[in-house]
Image: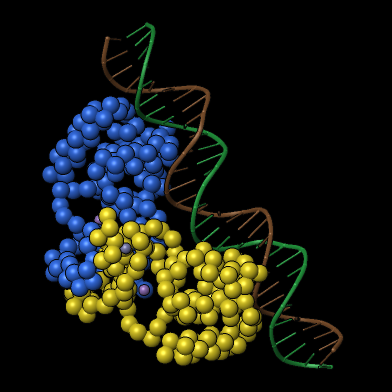
Chain colours: A blue, B yellow, C green, D brown
Amino acid sequence: MKINVKNRELKTVRRYLYEKGLKHSLKRHTIAELFFREDKHLSVEELYDMVKKIDPDISFSTVYRALRLLEKAGFAVSRRFMDGVKRFEPVHPKEHHDHLICIKCGKIIEFKSKKIEKLQKEIAGKYNFELLSYRLELYGYCEDCKKHR
Amino acid sequence: MKINVKNRELKTVRRYLYEKGLKHSLKRHTIAELFFREDKHLSVEELYDMVKKIDPDISFSTVYRALRLLEKAGFAVSRRFMDGVKRFEPVHPKEHHDHLICIKCGKIIEFKSKKIEKLQKEIAGKYNFELLSYRLELYGYCEDCKKHR
DNA sequence: CTATTTTTGACATTGATTTTCATTTTCAAT
DNA sequence: ATTGAAAATGAAAATCAATGTCAAAAATAG
Ligand SMILES: [Mn+2]
Ligand SMILES: [Mn+2]
Ligand SMILES: [Zn+2]
Ligand SMILES: [Zn+2]
């Protein structure tokens, strides 16, 4: 159940805050809750626009800082796709994944490929590289967008 | 021979300028020549710093515009690696390639993998995506840097 | 409730990129 | 070589997302 996942994460956030001597505020909670519920790749701006509808008294700064906090705490990761803006997504207890990005509607589909990972390791090995991270992004038209163009 | 490649490219640039009714300036030539000669992944700033040593009267603006022109004309491509700054590299009549990037010294190694490309196409197909472009970047320590750390 | 510490909102700053505009240079036609 | 129209240039300003500052507000322990 999505709800349960979200609640588990919120509780863990709460524990993290307590352990770090940070305070648990309603605004922070509102932001985190929405962030986990949406479970998407959102820019600060985008999340802020959604947060505003729930509580118009939450500022951009607060959304920005909440996301950075979640990232530092390991509950979120950020990445930049080709449009250059930083996007955050919740970290799930799943491994690395990559993305298919629609250049028309912006839809993002996640995928994993053990085969590709294996080939990457081979390539790194060939150049005596110590591989620490990587990113693979596939751009094009999604199923819907390739019809209507 | 590298020189010949470079000269061929400069001539082609000249032809492009003529066809578009643009003018051929010495400054533009100096910038393009250096850009093709270096044949690396350079930010505007980096190329500007190198250009200054050849002709200190060339401004940042001019380097910036020259690179954009080269990109529009198809002689250069730009990309952003994880540091977020836009880098340009000459387009050679070779296919798509990907990058290994050292997170310590910044060295960039190019590679190609038909196998990975094939897997990517399979993945795109699985999601009914029309694949147009992609980027794959591998980050880690290069051969030298993994020793001295 | 009070004291202490953290959080917040508004605004400022940064850093890279891009645009603006007055001046200079190119180039084709004299 | 001279000239005039169009493009290129340099310096400065504008933009834009990301981040920093700080006084006021809110949270938590005692
Ligand atoms: Mn993702
Ligand atoms: Mn390259
Ligand atoms: Zn789409
Ligand atoms: Zn290195």
**Image height check: is A69 above or below B10?**
above
Residue drawn at x 19%, y 57% is A96
Q: Position of residue C22 (x, y in %)?
A: 77, 63
Figure quadrant of residue B98: bottom left
**Image height check: is A22 above or below A52?**
above
Q: What is the quadrant of the N terminus of chain A in the image? A: top left
Q: Is residue B93 left or right of residue D16?
A: left
Q: Position of residue B76 (x, y in %)?
A: 45, 77
Figure quadrant of residue A36: top left
Q: What is the quadrant of the C terminus of chain A in the image? A: bottom left
The residue nearer to you, when weighing C13 against B103, is B103
Residue drawn at x 34%, y 69% is B108
The residue nearer to you, when weighing B34 against A118, is B34
Q: Position of residue D3 (x, y in %)?
A: 85, 84
Residue located farthest toward the front when viewing the structure as drawn: B148
Count the labels in the image: 0
Residue drawn at x 53%, y 89% is B11
The residue nearer to you, when weighing A30 against C3, is C3
Q: Position of residue B51 (x, y in %)?
A: 56, 71
Asked whether the viewer can see residue A102, the reply is no
Residue drawn at x 17%, y 63% is A112
Asked whether the viewer can see residue A4, the reply is yes
